[in-house]
Amino acid sequence: MRKWLTNTYYSFPVQLLVLHLRGNLVLIALWVFLVVLVSDGIGSKYGIKYLFLSPEYLGEVGFWSFFFLGLAFGAMVMSWNLTTYLISAHYFPFLATLARPFTKFSINNLLVPVGFTVLLLTLHIRFEWYYEFRDLNQIFLNCLGFLFGMATLIVSLLVYFYFTNKDILSFLRVQDQPPPHLVADLAPGRRPVDYEGVLTGRNRWRVDTYLTESLRFRLVRSVAHYDSRIIMRVFKQNHINALIVQLFSLVLLVTLGYLIDNPYFRIPAAASILLIMSILIALTGAISYWFHRWRIAVLLLLFAGVNYITKYEWFNHKNKAYGLNYQTPPATYDYDSLASLCSPQNVQEDMANTIAILDNWKKKVAHEQEGKPKMVLFMVSGGGLKSAVWSMQVMRYADSLSNGRLMDYTTLIAGASGGLIGSAYYRELYLRKLRGAPIDPNDPKYVDNVGRDLLNSVTFTIASNDLFLPWIKFEAGGYTYVKDRGYAFERQLNENVEGVFNGKSVSDYWLPEQWAQIPMMFITPSIVNDGRRMVISPHGVSYMMAAPIAIRNPNSVEIDAVDFGRLFEEQDGSNLLVSSALRMNATFPYILPNVYLPTQPNIELMDAGFRDDFGLKSAIRFLHVFKDWIRKNTSGVVLVQVRAFDRERKVPASDNQGVIESIFNPLGIAGKIVSLQNYEHDTNLGFLYDILGEDRFEIIRFTYLPSLEHNEATISFHLTQRERNDILHAIDLESNRKSLERLVEVMRPSKPMSLE
């Protein structure tokens, strides 16, 4: 038993693993990171593991989606083998004496990749069987697709190395004794290699056996009788070949950036992640290979250098809002300019225009109501595609059960992230129906459209384009911009919703909103620089920039929002594409790029949820500003709140913590953004009850709650089929059914309907 353990320990596969654990911890850390991702250790709330366990290609989960996932994993495995071969092969001089040295190295270096493959396929089988209810034939095809894809790439590269790599026999130079200059030779790269093991007839790193291509163990032979210069030439030639393959892979990935508009080249999101990991492995290996003990210092210098040169515009691509003019002089962004935007004159002008819209709304619903109508405001929460599907589902049920009255009775829609994407889509479908298009907005296919994957295109573009300074250009709204993951997101969104937002600008909604054909919509991304909200609307909304007291008593309260249209009047702000506005409102950090606006100094926008994940700030400010008109012209306000997740009522414990854990306790509240917003909103809603009167203000809530047998759907731009089904069925919950009944009752006509 002891001999067997000794033989196993000193086998080449095990010794390679030991070497990696001792000297290549950064590379091992990348594998550990992948394991944590697929096993739900990181990003469980955002559904990261589903990208690996249920990848989509062309909207389907099947053989081909797993084939491309396997292909990308094969690329990562070969990057792992090539990189570790570059930085580790010199420890094992016996490799140079073998036929096909890199092939044998790769076979013996597969312990880590094989372990990850077994873990991934095991988790996939469990996930598909228990959560997606797929049959065994489909699961088998998925696994076969993954293995076939992985094998295709690995075998292709091994065939290339078979015909191009040379072994020691190719050089035909054998000596009985090593030359005296042996120790002074340099290995490929910039570091000296100690060949003391060769001088004494031993390997530098003890290895007794190795695996052959037929998976049989063979004894390692001494290399002392070979000329060290020949061994060096073998390694050098193999290393150059490996560098050529890695360089070719990099060029191929960049070339794919040209093809981001072709859906057939939008590989699964997890495949893009694996390609990025391949690049990181190759980069880490290259730095270790060339600089060895100086690698940490070089990495630090590299980070500092990248940070320095990217301060210059040529090296730093900044994402832009499509439709805006970045060539004209930028708008001034400071407190004085903001104060001038919400001057009493501007506020009175914008309020008068909005009151005209409200008057048109009142006339529209007057034919159904005796007395004053109820005003409905529709507020939707963020939450990726989960909230997009949920908001669409609530809207179509409410509209269908009220015989098409939802859009008629609603005066304002606001919210964050995916919730507003779903609401904007439903509003656009309703408008097209009004204009005579053969569309039924309540058709379930539109809910399916808005729930389609948005993540694959984005992650593929990051891997093939954004990491290499994007430079491919396109035209939008009459101006030229650079393609990046922001462009990929908008293009994919337009494809998913059958092109309804294609080329559509914010100003295209001015007339239908003005005549109250559709509700007004406020799109409110957050300004990173100072935390204010940017309010995007086709109409002037300077009254949204501060509480009404700020107009009557300047400097009494802070300006906490910005009227986008007024700020960018000279930069063609009304030409902003709707898809860009929705993207800015849903810009989750790192997944989508922050949007830089043409201001001096530059400001950037990101997700609305960082200031208001529920749209309630917009509703509260709007009701506060127009409270007098509301009291006079309506019988009250109904605030419909559509939430993609329930309130967090579980109190985390602070006991049983170590000293280190307790150090971070004061920072914990920073991660409670949503809970803090809930408290603030409840306080402000309490004020509205007092301002409007308890009998004139009502809140109707629709909340997505996961079914008992499933976990909650993730906050992501990718949903599994099980998650879609779970979200759609949440409308049947008793609490949501009661909310539907109450909302339909609010919109029920009180006048007898005309027979005409």
Image: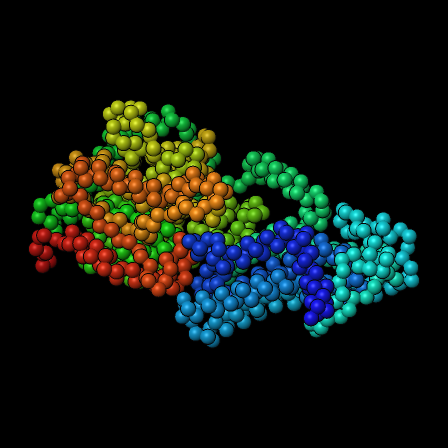
**519 displayed left or right of 723:** left
Relative to 41, is 347 above or below?
above
Specify whether 188 is left or right of 674: right
Task: Name the quarter where the C terminus is drawn.
Answer: bottom left
Q: Name, please, the residue furthest toward the bottom.
A: 137
> What residue is rendered at 43% in x and 47% in y?
656
Horizontal and vertical percent position of residue 293: 71, 44
What residue is drawn where x is 35% and y is 47%? Answer: 651
The foreground one among 21 and 426 is 21
| Residue at 47% across, 40% down | 663
Residue 595 % position (x, y): 45, 41
Tell me residue 570's x, y (percent).
39, 33
Which quadrant of the figure contains the N terminus?
bottom right
Q: Report if residue 440 is visible in the image.
A: no
x and y percentages locating residue 625 in the rendered image: 23, 34
* Residue 215 appears anywhere in the view: yes
Q: How many marks?
A: 0
* Residue at 46% over, 75% down: 136
Q: Is residue 551 above or below residue 622?
A: above
Q: Nearer the viewer, residue 24 or 100?
A: 24
Q: Nearer the viewer, residue 687 or 658?
A: 658
User: Residue 569 or 531: which is nearer the viewer?
Assistant: 531
Q: Is residue 90 above or below residue 696?
A: below
> What scheme was used to colour the molecule?
rainbow
Name the side, left or right, on which 12 lies relative to 682: right
